[in-house]
Amino acid sequence: MSDIEVVERWYEALGARDLTAIAELLHPEAVVTQDERLPWGGRWVGHDGFLQFAGALTGSIASAVTIDAIFEADGEVIEVGRTKGTVVANGQAFDIPEVHRFTVRDGQIVAAHFAIDTPGMLAALHA
């Protein structure tokens, strides 16, 4: 698979909640990061770290990503789109832009950074 195909498959696996495929696509020592101001933000390492990240995320929001573009730039695979959903605690709806950056090596994601409109998400979380 090309690096873009790895990332496309990642989103398919996430959408299907296919933990086997997710584990195959994510390097055992992968680093996942997101803005620390978010309840699920921080630096998460490896499969266990990703599961903790995913648990904190899904415990805070119910959301889906709409992909506008996936392309390669500067040695990374970049995904640009929107995340839309609701906050679990208060039911507040949100629809905000996001950019995800992936580093792929030998068919596995070794690093991922998930950037969103943090102020917009914080406003929804605290509505």
Image: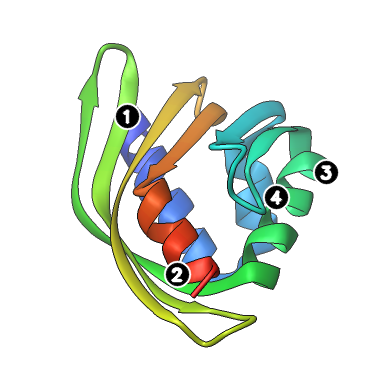
> Considering only vertical position in the picture, is 91 above or below 113?
below
Q: Position of residue 71 (x, y in %)?
A: 20, 33
Q: Nearer the viewer, mark 4 or mark 1?
A: 4
Q: Is residue 22 left or right of residue 93?
A: right
Three-letter amino acid code of the residue under disc 4: Phe
> In the picture provided, is 8 more to the left or to the right than 14?
left
Q: Provide the residue designation for mark 4.
A: 53
Answer whether labels 4 and 2 touch (C-beta < 8 Å).
no
Q: Amino acid at mark 2?
A: Ala
Q: Nearer the viewer, residue 34 or 105?
A: 34
Residue under label 2: 124
Secondary structure of the residue carrying numbered label 1: strand
Mark 4: few/some/many CA within 10 Å (<14, 14-19, 20+): many
**Residue holding disc 3:** 48
Which residue corresponds to the image point at 76% horizontal and 52% vertical from the top-left? 51
Mark 3 vs 2, N-terminal side: 3
Q: Which mark is residue 77?
A: 1
Colour scheme used in the picture?
Answer: rainbow
Q: Earlier in the sequence, mark 4 or mark 1?
A: 4
> Residue 121: x and y, percent?
43, 59
Q: Is residue 4 left or right of residue 25?
A: left
Check contact, mark 3 vs mark 2: CB within 8 A: no
Q: Is residue 103 above or below residue 33?
A: above
Compare marks 1 and 3 and give the one earlier in the sequence. Answer: 3
- Calculate the distance from the C-alpha at mark 1 to the C-alpha at mark 3: 23 Å
User: Which residue lies at the image location 52% right of the left edge and 20% below the top edge?
Assistant: 106
Q: Distance between the Cα atoms at labels 3 and 4?
A: 9 Å
The span from disc 4 to disc 2 (Cα, nearest Å) is: 19 Å
Mark 3 is on which residue type?
Asp
Residue in front for this viewpoint, 34 or 47: 34
Q: CA distance from mark 2 to mark 1?
A: 28 Å
Q: Earlier in the sequence, mark 2 or mark 1?
A: 1
